[in-house]
Amino acid sequence: MAQDIRYPSLKYIKPAARRRIPHFVWEYLDSATGGEATKDRNVRSLQAVTMMPAILLGEIKPSTHQTFLGHSFDVPFGIAPVGLSGAIWPDAERILACEAAKSNIPYTLSTVACQTPETIGPICDGKGWFQLYPPRDPEVRRDMINRIAAAGFKTLVVTVDIPAPSRRERQTRGGITQPPALTPRILAQIALRPRWALGMAQFGRPEMPFVASYGNNVRGLPTTEHLGYLLRISPDAEYLKWVRDHWKGSLIIKGVLNPADCPRLEQIGADAIWVSNHAGRQFDGAPATVDVLPQIRAATKLPLVFDGGIEGGLDMIRALALGADFIMMGRSWHYALGALGRKGPAHLTKILQQDLIANMSQLGLHNLQNCAQALWPQKN
Ligand SMILES: Cc1cc2nc3c(=O)[nH]c(=O)nc-3n(C[C@H](O)[C@H](O)[C@H](O)COP(=O)(O)O)c2cc1C
């Protein structure tokens, strides 16, 4: 197929997406905070992990299956929560949830998505994850959790790494205003991207219906002040314990970098830990996620989700080798949507799996449980 030839990897998908997404949206998706060193570090540190190709093993038949929190997945990766997905590409949440259900991978719906849990939950077919930014008001908290469970989500991801808004200078320069407004500059950027504009005309102006349903007089996109007030952004251990007591499904804590935090999360009753630096969007002095992964692995027996800078199957093998149990990606799914529209996510799933298989074959790996044996220099 033409897309297999033109877009064999993310390296080629990304520039195509940039050509089809309005500039201010691109800056929202692609940027990080400060000098964006943490974002770059995530990628470079993964690339620096070397592994030894294997020979004299006969035929290798790699299996990409991975079991995580009791579910058997066809591949070891899924879709991380991205706020306002539906503003990045028209109808993105629904497209991603459908692809996830079809390919048997987890899709994580963000609290600040353009769709409600009630719309997306049923599409996910019991495999959906819901990401919660911790609401301040206990009544809102209780109601949100009840709605998320009733919509069929079995896994709750609580994000804990947003104690305050970050500056995201590149995003600011892109022209997004607070509150969001269609300024002449934004309109000009939209006019240059007709496919995106037509899609938005078809599906309607992006809103945050879940969050808006808890706002007084909030319509459309809430401002950052409103979001900051509504979603208590720096939960403590007591808060997480409350969530644990009220959520019956699996609980994952997202945004962990410090191994010293792991025992407390175990005590709280988390089912898994999500190693993430929010893709460098919050703090530019953080370590690369892959650089803290071995220490986090040593600090806890809990299953580990990993994200940050993953660009292909080889990066996934690297992270699995260093202690991750499951891999999530954020921006890449949206680059794929931008480049190829509705067909993008399925294409990305396919090429990521192909890349996994190709690299597992080189490393002599029949399955993903033994990735660590290929690390070089060897770890004791
Ligand atoms: C545009 C954008 C929006 C995001 N929104 C959220 C969000 O609403 N909730 C959350 O927990 N993480 C959010 N993240 C972080 C992702 O879930 C994930 O941690 C990160 O994108 C992984 O790094 P990668 O983009 O290099 O794959 C967002 C990331 C991006 C790029």
Image (cartoon, helix red, strand yellow):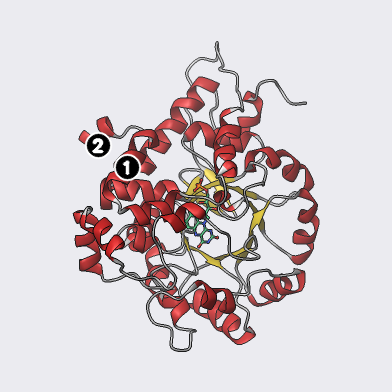
Which residue is tagged 1? 347
x 50%, y 14%: residue: 58
Judging from the image, what secondary structure is the residue with disc 2 in?
helix
Judging from the image, what secondary structure is the residue with disc 1 in?
helix
Which residue is tagged 2? 3
Quarter of the image for the C terminus: give it.
top right
Quarter of the rendering containing residue 115:
bottom left
Nearest the eye: 121 or 293 = 293
Q: Is residue 377 visible?
A: yes
Quarter of the image for the N terminus: give it.
top left
Q: Rate crowding at label 2 as few (under 14), some (14 to 19) or many (20 or more) other CA atoms within 10 Å.
A: few
Residue 205 higher or lower than 46, as above or below? below
Provide residue 363's location: percent of width, then percent of height: 54, 22
Residue 281 higher or lower than 158, as above or below? above
Q: Rate crowding at label 1 as few (under 14), some (14 to 19) or many (20 or more) other CA atoms within 10 Å.
A: many
Q: Is residue 1 visible?
A: no
| Nearer-N-terminus badge (2/1) | 2
Label 2 amino acid? Gln
Nearest the eye: 105 or 279 = 279
Nearest the eye: 293 or 65 = 293
Nearest the eye: 213 or 18 = 18
Provide residue 148's location: percent of width, then percent of height: 51, 74
Quarter of the rendering containing residue 267:
bottom right
x 24%, y 58%: residue: 188
